[in-house]
Amino acid sequence: MTVVPVTGGTPAGDVLTLAVATLWVLLPGAVVLLAAGLRRLPVLLGGAPAVSIGLSTLAATATGALGTRFTWWTVLTATAVVAALAAALRGRAGALEDRTPRGPLLATAALALAAAGTVAEVFRRGLGALATPSQEHDTITHTLVTARILRTGDAAPWRAQAVDVVTGDPAQYYPNGLHQWAALTAHTAGVDAVSGLNATSVVVLAVVQTLGLVALAARVLPRDWLPAGGAAAVAAALAHQPLLAMHHDSGALSNAAAIAVAPGTIALLLPPAHRSGRLPGRAVAALVPALALAAAGALTVHPSAALTVGGGVLGAGVVLALAGPGGRDLRRDLRWPAGLAGAAVLAGLLVGTSLLRAAAAGGGSSSRFARDIPVQTLPDALHRVLTLPLQGGLDPDATRSQWWLAGAVVVGVLLAGRAGAAVLLPWLVWSALAVAYLVGVRGPGVDLVWDSAWNSYYRVVAHGSPWAWLLAGVAVARIATTYARRAAPVVAAALGVVLLAGAVVVAGPTEVAALRARYAAPEYERVDADDEAAGRFLAAHVRRGERVLNSGNDGSTYDYVLHGVPVMATTAVPLASQPDLRVLARDLRDMTPQVRELLREHRVGWVVVDSLAPGLPLRPADAEFFGVDGYAVPPGLTDLDGVPGLRRVFTSGSVGVWEVVGQGAVP
């Protein structure tokens, strides 16, 4: 069967939406960093996204506490207030860093543009249009969270995932930094939640990741090695693991976004250079609000950023303090550590409550999730970590290595030396942790990492991926500066282009095919044109106060996302906090007295079901409740045509809509 995906928009409109998404993630943060006195362009641009998301988190928290709407002007207000505070704290303190030399900067800019353009083209071919929703399981949640921010203006992280989208209760914490940004994009560009979310997903990989790697290279490598950041960006542009794999295998967009935001955040939190050797106190104080917002923004995108960013700052910071230029001044001057401590306190005040709620709910505890890779021998583990296989749904046996990237990383390891030690050490530590996971090491320290990664190998190894990509860049920079000193920027750019060309030839078709399998030419159906037709029908016929009973495992959730239809099921399997919905999903077709009472109580006037939803295995407790090991459609929502009190009123392909009649469902 051919799936006809829901889509729309125009190429020109998509370009505009991407531009709006880029502005929202760069401009607010850049304004605050400029006001704080940061002038080094690579760090300014690479660090801006985390600060921007921190500003939207500040606005979301304030509006959530006050009961007002989160919208574009609240974010701009937060930006103006924080920028004014930073400027006042800075006073007449000078800029923290000199400008970057022109040659390395131009070479880096060329590579960064090539990387961003390549990612954008891969997504254009894979999605077809920004309005095309993914068929992946987790995007049910992503689009619902984004759509509810758009429709209600409630972006408070501690109630981001409203299990009931109409009442907002029950609601639970969900890392919604990406979704705040997507909602801002959709609102100001005049598009729907799907287009806004897809636009931010593209910009995460094309812009945020690219600029963040450049910023990190600027902070931890010699100044004439800046093109290493651009080369890292082109190496990462088509690296399937971990970011593109998260789109393909699990829809883990928040985790992917956190990995992409991490390099720029680390760059901001590492101490900047200053001509005098010692950082002026007022200059440090001016940056504290921006640092706090960057940390809070990264954590709001996904809590695992605490490990990615914290581990990176610790690892690179130790090397810079012990062996980097100006290391003696860093060891003697406590102003920057004091500033970081102050920023940590402010970030904790902003997002601490939300994170505590997430921890109390169990997070990604490894006790709740089975390993995604069996325990391996040490040689096999080392082979997997060093050869970077595609893995996952594309390569379940891990036989297809990303050799073009793996080879560059190994060369970078061999050539890093003292100048690249701040990149090498974090990569070694994260690689050791990845090996430890593969061989089955357990213990209080490492279990924290496994828990934060949902007991999944590709999430564990993701923490170290920015450092792997930077090592590929180190290889390019070291070769260029060693063998072509005067023309090093040109040679580095040329080597980066060669690296990108190899990636395009080897991995390009695979990446496009992987995206198309979930978007433009889906290999299975969750939401398609039939679901869209049913959504339009319901939007035209559902009366005020009525509810629509649906299956959260099919495309019916998009009835709310795209049309505001008040559906009841917002998760693939109704949660324990929804006992009435669980009973309806199990027993509707039996039309028991309890079912009839629940229909009346919840004013259920309509039922919508897609019979071709993908199969879904159930956890033991759910399997016991529903009486099946798994389902595509909940047992109570199958074969509804002969059920008394239900009348089929609409059909489009595999999707049917039934009106509830004769049961007194709607008073």
Image (tube, helix red, strand yellow):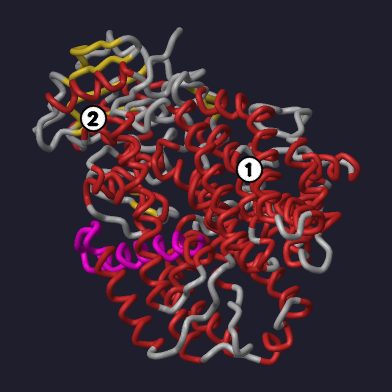
Residue toward you, 239 or 432? 239
Residue toward you, 298 or 86? 86
User: Can you say whether 464 is above or below 343 in the image?
Assistant: above
Q: Identify the mark nearer the N-term, 2 or 1.
A: 1
Viewport quadrant of the N terminus: top left
Q: Image quadrant of residue 244?
A: top right
What percent of the width, then of the height, locates residue 602? 21, 37
| Residue ID for mark 2 | 548
| Residue ID for mark 1 | 242
Instruction: Indicate left or right for 93 with 339 as reference.
Output: left
What percent of the width, then of the height, locates residue 500? 65, 38
Q: Which residue occupies 32% across, 66% down?
A: 61
Amino acid type of the residue that numbered disc 2 sits on in the rendered structure: Val
Provide the major secondary structure of the magenta segment: helix
Q: Image quadrant of residue 660?
A: top left
What percent of the width, then of the height, locates residue 6? 34, 23
Q: Which residue occupies 71% across, 28% down?
A: 396
Mark in front: 2 vs 1? 1
Amino acid type of the residue that numbered disc 1 sits on in the rendered structure: Pro
What percent of the width, then of the height, locates residue 26? 40, 58
Residue toward you, 439 or 261? 261
In the rendered structure, which segment of residues is drawn in magenta? 46-74
Q: Which residue occupies 62% across, 26% down?
A: 510
Q: CA distance from mark 2 to mark 1?
A: 38 Å
Residue 311 in sight: no
Is 64 one of the magenta-colored residues? yes
User: Can you say whether 24 is above or below 340 in the image?
Assistant: above
Is 334 one of the magenta-colored residues? no
